[in-house]
């Protein structure tokens, strides 16, 4: 029995929001229960995201409430019996309802109660986590349950904002929670927009109506609709405007060109098999000199510590320079960013492009899109580094920071616009950015950008007024993973003669990462983690969990165990996210607990370990997560906790990835994988991954014919699921 009535102190000083007041957990039977309507965050009886510890547990059973006060004394959070929020699943599946949430008109939901979505195939717990409030259409609709209703204090729109997996501004998401007045929400405003509810309500967004919390230092957003980086649309006039202005990027040359050393396996990149498919691919280069970069670019390349190109650069640079569309796949940490930045910047330099602040509408030549704020910011910094000393001006736009600031930055001159989809659409919609001069559209983490979470936004982007057609622009896609269905979809955005570049096995894990899979039960994960971290000491470690609440919980727990830890997830304010990354980068907090928001693209020096405390729901996500270590020829280690109760659907894909990266496959895992086949017969979570350019095959069956029996079954089953 473990009681969490104590204050969960901010042990490391870096996690300022972790404090549990009054929440009580009964750990004895591993069914952490919210005791009889006890107040989760009692400090004022209303929603206090900052004050309330985001209660959860690591058993996956009934994971708290994200800091909001579910029941501050009224109504009663009824029926948590059997509720289970592991991986975003039903909050109250056992019946009963969320009786009397808040006050006012909320009524208990019927029957199935808050049945949330399943995780999506991509394991996007960020979305899942937040979307869990009204998805399958079971229970919790409109009026029932959570509709805050007029005048309900705190039950209104903001609640929905939070619940809907708000990715834009956690502050704005929660902001509404405080609003009295008309918030309301749930229902239509929040969850049915654009018909996305069938995807698990990811698109929630704010509800309708006025009211809304106005924080001390925030203004109410004057217009809309706006979008956040994860493609979530928010209603106008709803949320508070975020006025966070990030620290300026470094100005000193040393900081701009700071880089880490390539590792002992860097030269082994040359041994990786490369396959370019499509007609008339240009000759690969072997040195940067052959890339014919202008002098300044060449200098910047060498100041960055790049002595020779990686395979994706050797092949990618000439393809892009030749004006071809490209879908490129190369393992994590192998230099994809420079592969697209260098040829684009070279062309802009050759065209004599120069930024001008004297234009009412900025017309960038290139737009680069990535799925998360931190990643797009990183790409922007890379672009800024390579463009150093030139007249080309990259600008970055993403959610969570002041829109006014963003616009001012854009209006200073913008040749290369880096952005998350939501903010890009927003800024284009405001008429500040024109697209008629666009030459390059780059989708980094392209498979993510085209999965169902982002695809509508990407379609909106390419359909924006003035956007050159795919015949008139050059479209470039990069990722380490490309599920076959996404490859097919991607073809919609590319010219028919696009080239497909595969460095190594498409979707394969980086072989410089030593992968270990440990069979565990949920209940021993915490102990296992502590044991592991005792061994890793101060070496930088990223610990991935499936939900935002669990990220808070584990981070707090580790702090209590005297492990300097910080966390990053979509419910943290942008300034907190940036602080967390900065503390992790600097080593102040050598452990970073993260959701999948940090799985892709982040390039952080000295990350020696990745721990999958929870395995992700898709194998691609696994590949990206473990790719935070073992970058650029350095070695790294990944340890994954495999709980057969939950992770069995991933077993077969995991076996495939392990063997593809020449890793030892534990016998028990093989057994689980095979028996999973015999029992469940499908792999809903282990989305299939392609082994090459899908155009090479007539279809899945044809591919299956060429594969060993084991793989055939994986692909076949996954395909049909
Ligand atoms: N030719 C090179 N020589 C030395 N270092 C390089 C070279 N190319 C890239 N790097 C460095 O390697 C690291 C990884 O590069 P990058 O972030 O572009 O990888 P990536 O392939 O995009 O990874 P991910 O799939 O995780 O997004 C960066 O620190 C980058 O500066």
Image (cartoon, helix red, strand yellow):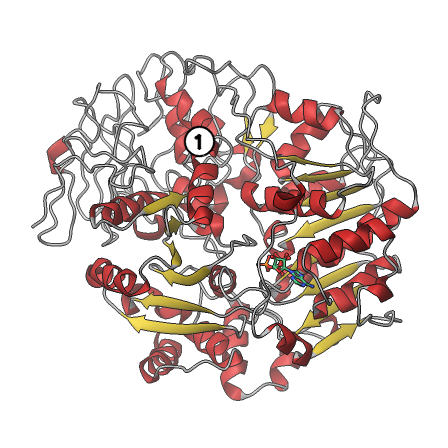
Q: Residue at 53% of width from left, 70% of height from top?
A: 509
**Horizontal placement of 397 versus 7: left or right?**
right
| Occupied quadrant, residue 195 | top right
| Occupied quadrant, residue 643 | bottom left
Quadrant containing ligand 1 reads bottom right
Give how far across and how far down residue 673 sits, in percent.
38, 78
How would you rate the neighbour count of disc 1 (Cα within 10 Å): few for under 14, some for 14-19, many for 20 or more? many
Give how far across and how far down residue 506 sits, in percent.
62, 71
Q: Is residue 493 visible?
A: no
Asked whether 175 or 688 is in front, the reply is 175
Give how far across and how far down residue 355 sits, in percent.
82, 32
Q: Residue at 78% of width from left, 68% of height from top?
A: 315
Q: Residue at 11% of width from left, 34% of height from top?
A: 36
User: Looking at the picture, does residue 580 appear above or below residue 645?
Assistant: above
**Horizontal placement of 204 versus 646: left or right?**
right
Q: Dot 1: what SS?
A: helix
Q: Is residue 595 visible?
A: yes
Which residue lies under the disc numbered 1? 170
How many dots with numbers? 1
Give how far across and how far down residue 277 sits, in percent.
78, 73
**Horizontal placement of 627 versus 84: left or right?**
right
**Horizontal placement of 409 versus 248: left or right?**
right
User: Looking at the picture, does residue 306 appear above or below residue 222?
Assistant: below
């Amino acid at each position: 029995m473990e009681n969490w009535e104590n204050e969960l102190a901010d042990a490391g000083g870096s996690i300022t929001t972790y404090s549990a007041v009054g929440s009580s957990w009964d750990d004895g039977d591993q069914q952490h229960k919210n005791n009889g309507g006890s107040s989760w965050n009692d400090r004022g009886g209303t929603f206090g995201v900052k004050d309330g510890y985001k209660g959860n547990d690591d058993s996956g059973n009934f994971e708290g409430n994200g800091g909001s006060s579910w029941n501050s004394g009224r109504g009663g959070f009824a029926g948590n019996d059997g509720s289970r929020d592991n991986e975003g699943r039903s909050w109250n599946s056992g019946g009963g309802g969320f009786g009397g949430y808040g006050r006012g008109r909320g009524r208990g939901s019927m029957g199935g109660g808050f049945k949330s979505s399943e995780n999506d195939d991509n394991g996007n717990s960020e979305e899942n986590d937040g979307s869990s409030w009204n998805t399958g259409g079971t229970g919790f609709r409109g009026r029932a349950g959570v509709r805050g209703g007029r005048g309900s204090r705190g039950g209104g729109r903001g609640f929905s904002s939070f619940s809907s997996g708000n990715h834009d501004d956690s502050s704005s998401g929660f902001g509404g929670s405080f609003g009295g007045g008309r918030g309301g929400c749930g229902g239509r405003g929040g969850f049915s927009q654009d018909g996305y509810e069938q995807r698990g309500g990811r698109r929630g967004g704010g509800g309708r109506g006025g009211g809304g919390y106005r924080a001390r230092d925030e203004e109410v957003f004057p217009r809309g609709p706006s979008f956040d980086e994860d493609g979530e649309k928010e209603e106008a006039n709803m949320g508070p405007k975020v006025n966070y202005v990030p620290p300026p990027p470094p100005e000193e040359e040393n900081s701009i060109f700071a880089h880490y050393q390539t590792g002992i396996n860097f030269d082994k990149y040359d041994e990786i098999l490369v396959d370019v498919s499509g007609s008339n691919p240009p000759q690969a280069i072997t040195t940067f000199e052959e890339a014919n970069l202008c002098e300044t670019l060449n200098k910047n390349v060498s100041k960055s510590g790049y002595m020779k190109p990686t395979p994706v650069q050797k092949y990618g640079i000439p393809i892009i320079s030749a004006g071809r569309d490209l879908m490129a796949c190369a393992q994590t940490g192998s230099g994809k960013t420079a592969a697209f930045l260098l040829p684009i910047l070279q062309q802009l330099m050759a065209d004599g492009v120069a930024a001008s602040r004297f234009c009412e509408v900025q017309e960038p030549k290139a737009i680069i899109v990535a799925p998360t704020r931190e990643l797009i910011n990183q790409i922007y910094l890379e672009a800024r580094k390579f463009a150093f000393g030139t007249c080309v001006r990259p600008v970055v736009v993403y959610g969570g920071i002041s829109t006014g600031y963003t616009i001012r930055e854009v209006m200073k001159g913008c040749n290369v616009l880096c952005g998350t989809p939501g903010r890009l659409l927003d800024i284009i919609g405001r008429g500040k950015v024109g697209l008629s001069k666009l030459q390059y559209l780059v989708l980094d983490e392209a498979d993510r950008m085209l999965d169902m979470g982002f695809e509508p936004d990407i379609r909106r982007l390419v359909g924006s007024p003035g956007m050159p057609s795919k015949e008139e622009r050059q479209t470039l896609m990069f990722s380490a993973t490309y599920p076959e269905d996404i490859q097919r979809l991607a073809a919609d955005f590319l010219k028919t003669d696009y080239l497909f570049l595969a460095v190594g096995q498409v979707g394969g894990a980086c072989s410089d990462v030593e992968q270990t899979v440990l069979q565990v039960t949920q209940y021993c994960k915490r102990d296992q983690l502590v044991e592991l971290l005792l061994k890793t000491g101060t070496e930088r470690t990223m610990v991935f969990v499936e939900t935002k609440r669990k990220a808070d919980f584990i981070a707090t727990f580790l702090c209590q165990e005297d492990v300097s830890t910080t966390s990053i997830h979509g419910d943290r304010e942008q300034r907190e996210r940036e602080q967390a990354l900065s503390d992790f980068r600097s080593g102040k907090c050598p452990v970073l607990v993260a959701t999948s928001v940090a799985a892709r693209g982040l390039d952080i020096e000295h990350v020696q370990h990745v721990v999958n405390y929870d395995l992700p729901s898709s194998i691609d996500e696994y590949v990206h997560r473990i790719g935070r270590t073992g970058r650029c020829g350095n070695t790294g280690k990944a340890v994954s906790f495999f709980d057969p109760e939950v992770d069995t659907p991933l077993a077969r894909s995991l076996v495939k990835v392990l063997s593809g990266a020449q890793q030892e496959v534990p016998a028990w895992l093989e057994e689980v994988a095979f028996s999973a086949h015999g029992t469940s017969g499908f792999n809903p979570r282990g989305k299939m991954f392609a082994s090459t350019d899908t155009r090479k095959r007539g279809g899945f069956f044809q591919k299956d014919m060429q594969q060993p029996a084991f793989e055939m079954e994986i692909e076949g089953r996954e395909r049909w699921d």
